[in-house]
Image: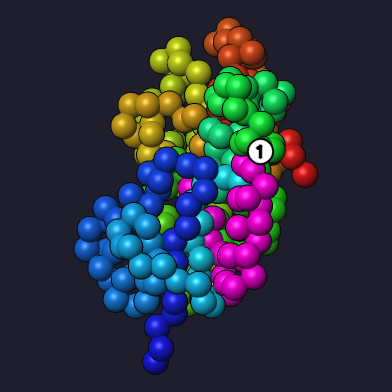
Amino acid sequence: MKKPRVAFFDFACCEGCQLQVANMGEAVLDIIGLIDVVEWREVMSEKWNGKLDVAIVEGSITDPHAVERIKQIRKRSKIVVALGSCATIGGVNGMKNNYVLDEIRQYVYGNSYQFFPTEATKAVHQVVKVDYFVNGCPVYIPELVAVLKAVLHGIPYDVPDYPVCVECKLNENVCMYDRKVACLGPVTRAGCNSWCINNGNICYGCRGMVSNPNEKGAQDVIAKYNISMDLIVNKMNMYNKCREIG
């Protein structure tokens, strides 16, 4: 049986999620044995311009060239997988959307800014159809493996739509709010096994918001611990600015 052709692509990102894939250890060998990787800049120099069964895309879409490039990748791919926060929700690059774009260009490129076109940062699905989402910054390897298996079996993968707090309680973590620290777990999609909190950090919201967050409950928690709402909004802004774009 012919192995599916798979390629990895990167747009505006740090490529840390692709490094997560490369660092999967033995699990990556099991998956690599089932597919034909034809392009992956992190680990190989070969390029592929033909049809693809699966395109795995890291990074957000931030300029006209990227828009055209992702559209071409979509046209020649049966399945598109958005890999990591930049691809799934726009990620930290979305903070650019807080500012006037010409001002940002001038700040970054100086007097030559007119030679560097830009536009509002978008997640991949805000430009083309995406079939599977692997959230997180970086991606959580057990979830990544589960999504890749779903892709290879041709079955859906449903991203959890309940908050990280559910996983945090199952892992018997002490609530960060009880430690007097603001955390975005109450409104952030689960699926990471509360990875950050398990290791003593807070949830920064890198997986995006649940579709129907318990805003009243979150407000009650914030008020109980006398935490500034502006602080919470600023933390949400770090990863979730692109949700405002249709």
In the displayed structure, 127 sits above or below 185; it is below
Crowd around label 1: few <14 · some 14–19 · many ≥20 (10 Å): few
Q: Can residue 224 be seen here?
A: no
At 58% from the left edge and 14% from the top edge, which residue is drawn?
231
The quadrant holding residue 200 is: top left
Residue 246 magenta-highlighted: no
Q: Is residue 70 left or right of residue 150?
A: right
At 38% from the left edge and 61% from the top edge, which residue is drawn?
40
Q: Pointer 1: what residue?
A: 117
Quarter of the N terminus within the rendering: bottom left
Label 1's element? loop
Figure disc tally: 1
Residue 63 magenta-highlighted: yes
Q: What stretch of residues is rendered in magenta?
A: 62-85
Q: Can residue 81 be seen here?
A: yes
Q: What amino acid type is highlighted by mark number 1?
A: Pro
In the displayed structure, 105 sits above or below 6; it is above
At 60% from the left edge and 22% from the top edge, which residue is drawn?
111
Between 20 and 196, the residue placed more toward the observer is 20
Q: Position of residue 21 (x, y in %)?
A: 34, 55
Q: Position of residue 63 (x, y in %)?
A: 64, 43
Q: Position of residue 162 (x, y in %)?
A: 58, 44
At 51% from the left edge and 66% from the top edge, which residue is drawn?
55
In the displayed structure, 55 sits above or below 59; it is below
Between 74 and 107, the residue placed more toward the observer is 107
Q: Is residue 214 left or right of residue 109?
A: right
Residue located farthest toward the bottom when viewing the structure as drawn: 1
Between 37 and 41, the residue placed more toward the observer is 41
Q: Is residue 131 left or right of residue 201?
A: right
